Amino acid sequence: MTDFTRYSRQMLFSPIGEDGQKKLTNSSVLIVGMGALGTALANHLVRAGIGHIRFIDRDYVERSNLQRQMLFDEDDVTGALPKAIAAKNKLTKINSDIKIEAIVGDASPKNIDELINGMDIVLDGTDNFQTRFLLNDACFKYGIPFVYGGAVSSRGMSAIFVPNETPCLRCFITSTDQGGQTCDTIGVISPIVDIVASLQVVEVIKFLVGDVKNRRKSLLTLDIWNNYHYDMKFSTPKTDCPTCQKKEYPALNLAEKDIITVLCGRETVQIQAKQGFNLDVWADRLKPIGKVQKTPFLLKVELPEGERLVLFPDGRTLVQGTEDQVRAKTLYSRYIGL
């Protein structure tokens, strides 16, 4: 039997109360990504007493993570622990009464059905739009709310998308809107991560306790350094939206083998983007990362991790120095953005 005394202050908050706390204890939540956003999300949800928390992450803890990824420490770096495992180690010490399920892996069209099975709500802790569209499409296919969040530099965005009630992520952000700005190219400050995660979690709690009236019905954008804040109110969904209107769910039909290929015998993974690269633009973006060599035909950059990226104008990228597809995707997402 759950000991509710640890949640006494939360239950004193009248919109939650004892009934709401019981609903939280009986809820199941999926977090995809256990980096900056994911660790902050999990920290709040574990402390709030969500009964079952499942999360998945494909990366391992590095020293540069410690600036903003709150569940990790230097021992995790020394041990090169997978983020999912390091997070579970910390979270179990915070709340041993709940079920914490840590998965070391990559969310993909192959496993997304299994990941969201039995979940009441899905949270975005990722850093790339390929995975976000995957979550968006899966959630709308199966009628599960999707809580979007993103943070880079001093900017953040957040919204809760509920099937049959609101538009979906694709109604606001299309695949052609993806940029090359990631935390590893233009940086990020920790406060924006905490703010975005808090905005996501409060909408999760509102949904799980059933407070429909007070749920935020907008896509919130903010820049805490330049003092900018904008709420894009939800309107009717786009009539041609392939997800929430046409119910085509394109991300679920994406054949990953068509965009990621291991080049046998070359210790190289090739990743094919949908659009080409402007080599001049990418040379400027990647110069702060490592040594860059540009020719009229390709762009090479030596990464701090030891691998090399080679970009071609037709949208191909070679990740040289590994044949591990998960490792290649991690580096590609970190510096190019999926």
Image: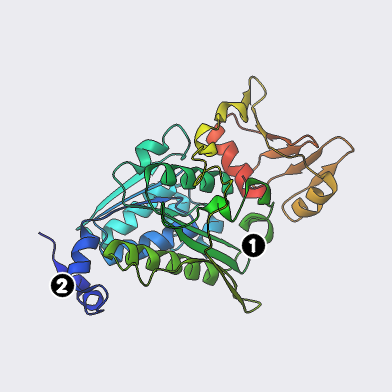
CA gap between label 1 and label 2 equals 40 Å
Question: Which residue is labeled 2 in the image?
Answer: 5
User: In the drawing, does residue 174 fall left or right of residue 10?
Assistant: right
- Give the image location of residue 143, x and y in percent: 37, 47
249 w.r.t. 171: above or below: above
**Nearer the viewer's eye, disc 1 or disc 2?**
2
Q: Amino acid at mark 2?
A: Thr
32 w.r.t. 96: above or below: above
Residue 139 or residue 82, whichever sits in front: 139
User: In the drawing, does residue 268 fall left or right of residue 212?
Assistant: right
Task: Give the residue displayed 53% in from the left and 58% down from the top.
Answer: 236
Residue 97 or residue 180, whichever sits in front: 180
- Give the image location of residue 222, x and y in percent: 59, 71
Other residues around mark 2 within 10 Å, as few (<14) / some (14–19) / many (≥20): few
- Give the image location of residue 319, x and y in percent: 67, 35
Assign a secondary structure to mark 1.
Answer: loop
14 w.r.t. 69: above or below: below
Question: Mark 2 or mark 1, which is nearer the start of the sequence?
Answer: 2
Question: Would you say residue 263 is visible in this rendering?
Answer: yes
- Give the image location of residue 190, x and y in percent: 54, 68
Assign a secondary structure to mark 2.
Answer: helix
The residue lying furthest to the right in this view is: 296
Question: Which residue is labeled 1 in the image?
Answer: 187
Residue 338 or residue 288, whichever sits in front: 338
Residue 213 or residue 283, whichever sits in front: 213
User: In the drawing, does residue 98 fall left or right of residue 265?
Assistant: left
| Quadrant of the drawing holding the C terminus | top right
Other residues around mark 1 within 10 Å, as few (<14) / some (14–19) / many (≥20): few
Q: Amino acid at mark 1?
A: Gly
Question: Would you say residue 59 is visible in this rendering?
Answer: no
